[in-house]
Image (cartoon, rainbow, N blue to C red):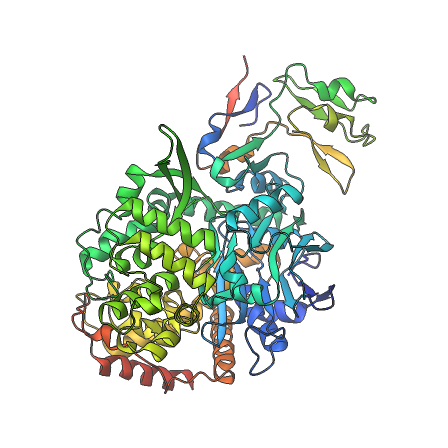
Amino acid sequence: MASKNKRLDIVDVDRCVGCLSCMFACARRFGEGGYDRSAIAIRSAAGVERGFVVIVCRACKDPPCAKVCPVGALSLRKGGGVYLNPAKCIGCGFCREACPIGAVMWDDELNKPIICTQCGYCVNYCPHGVIELVEVE
Amino acid sequence: MHPKDTLSNVLYIDLTRKTYWVENRKDLFEEYIGGAGVAINLLREECPRGTDPLGPDNPIVFAVGPFTGLYPIASKTVAMFKSPLTGNLGESHAGGRSAIAIRMAGYGAIVIKGASEKPVYIAIHGDKIFFRDASALWGIKSSLTVGRIIRERELGAGIRTIMRIGRAGEKLVRYACVVTETYRHFGRLGLGAVFGSKKLKALVVSGRRTIPVSDKKGYREVYKELFDAMVKSPAMRKYHDLGTAANVLPLNELGALPVKNLQASKFEKAKEISGENLAEKYLGRRLACAHCPVACIHLAALREPYEDEPYFYKTTFISYDYELIYSLGSMLGVENAEDLLKILDEVEVLGLDGISSGVALAWATEAFERGLIGEEETLGLKLRWGNVETYIKALRYIVAQPNEFYRVLARGVDYASRIYGGEEFALAFGGNEMAGYHTGPTGYFGFLAGSRHSHLDMGGYSIDQKVLGKEFTIEELVDRALKEEEWRQILSSLVVCFFARGIYKPEMVAKAFKPLGWKLNVKDLEEKGKIIHRLKYEFKYREGFSLDKLKIPKRIFEVPTPHGILKEETIKEMIEIFKKKLST
């Protein structure tokens, strides 16, 4: 299902009920529970009665995170966004600061960014139609 | 248990000395799983015999379980304490983000002991624990405001729980609740008053964590099976579409919906306060507890005009559930949805348990009608069925307690009726105000014999409905109810929401344990369920509970149930059978 020409899209954030199933799904790709290494995050928009905010990489065509990486650890992905080469990454955190939507998460244990690969595993676990995997033009 | 799982870490907090420590209680978690199983053991260890529920020696125990953070709808936290309402076992469950937050902070249980001299709130961010001054938060009018303030000051947006009390807890109303994530509650049995007695205004918990499993592939497979079952099951669909409010019309149709202090069991205005009407006219948003795809939490958006300015409105979000529609709706003769929502909102603002509050007002209204109390007691309030404006004032008085009558009413209807009379229509069982099910003998048997006198102990109301029109013996009903309560000890040790009990069947639970590295089969689970149930009963006996001293309000024998008019002898016979079964 994961294709290089697809990316995650937030189709309707108002359908989000805040169940966090997507966050747990992301962690489960690695066969783990919890959500410490999740590349997607949900939080309330100033109180749950106002709804939720979904924070995830939107697969920019010209991603600011890659531009500021001093060691070239982030390479451009065909459908937008970046791939991380952990061997090159020195954990400086510039990428996290450069992302204006806060979608570069951080792995405190490894001291490296957590980058969404647009695999769409989370989409299977969103029962309310908030996120989708879409073709990139 | 996986050797690297932090579930067995118990965080102990001493509010008197403002100190904390962590102990690894693998002994308890391996033997009693988590949640209720571990909590009853911690309560036995920490709560001395005969403890004053509002004294510093009464501990508060929060516990989650091995499925928390790993499987969907394992979204509940169990709180245990000695109840200031019943003077016996206090156990209350809540969802929101509470369970996930405790697990992600690295604990399986939290024990809060002692009492602070000055108001404080506790912030737990992973392994860092802070005692924060809450003097400025004490006395704030609305529990919602307290949440907003703490939200701005603390870390962990999106992944934290903010448990707090309202003024009801501060003023030690024996049925004050603890509110979490604004719309979920440790509602029953007065945990809010225990917080208040410790000068503990709130508890914030957050953390991030990875939980290791033993068989990654197996884990993913079981997860998917559970998730798919949940999303597709019709029961879950019902809770998503209308929420628990879906039960109003069917129960009314059956003649099981208590009306006006159970003077009737059918309400002519049921349609007005039904889940259908609320959803069509007011539903503003649905929410889920963390790690639950179902999203049963329903918020009504109530738009009200200000009277002093044209075209000026406020919109309030108010959560509603079946139990509150019963207790603060039909039980009080409230005839329209807007009035119902207004009183629900007030209960939320004050931080009261909705069920007990409604039953207390219902008793007071009938006592007022019968002249057992008068305006001298009510401070001029003319309590009348359906008069929400007056009821809201009465609720504020219950919290402020400006005279003897309201001080007494703040201790529950069992106590109030001993003082003012009307015990025959004071609808409490084991000291706990009843939930909204006039379904038949098993429902009431469950209220009386359930370990926390809650409808959720044995689900007797559901058994009553299932056996309608079928042949059964009294003994079969008791058997089913006891077996149900024993199995529910396992569900509340994992801790999964009872709504998913149809999915988390014994075989499924055993299967789900496997990839996590636990070796438990169906038989082990059923045995443990029985053991945990008996431990709870042991605690009850230790604190003076007796099946021989049960008080049954006569009212329940006067109004027809779906099983006809109940006989007192039937209920007593059930208790006798139950006693024998407990001792075997």
Query: Is B486 placed above or below B141 here?
Result: below
Task: Give percent across and percent down for residue B329.
Answer: 29, 54
Q: Residue furthest top?
A: A137
Decide if residue B347 is on the left or right side of residue B179: left
Q: Nearer the viewer, residue A41 or A28?
A: A41
Task: Give percent across and percent down for residue A35.
Answer: 63, 43
To which quarter of the image does residue A4 belong?
A: top right
What is the count of numbered marks? 0
Decide if residue B561 is on the left or right side of residue B86: left
Task: Give percent across and percent down for residue B245.
Answer: 32, 50
Query: Is B212 placed above or below B571 here?
Result: above
Is residue B517 visible to the viewer in this orientation of the structure? yes
Task: Give percent across and percent down for residue A69.
Answer: 79, 22
Q: Which residue appears at 27% of the width and 79% of the height? A: B571
Is residue B68 visible to the viewer in this orientation of the structure? no
Image quarter in which the N terminus of chain B is found: bottom right
To which quarter of the image does residue B23 belong?
A: bottom right
Decide if residue B207 is on the left or right side of residue B425: right
Query: Is A6 placed above or below B514 here?
Result: above
Q: Which residue appears at 72% of the width and 55% of the height? A: B130
Image quarter in which the C terminus of chain B is found: bottom left
Q: Which of B473 and B175 is in front in this view?
A: B175
Q: Nearer the viewer, residue B231 or A2?
A: B231
Q: Which of A39 and B357 is in front in this view?
A: B357
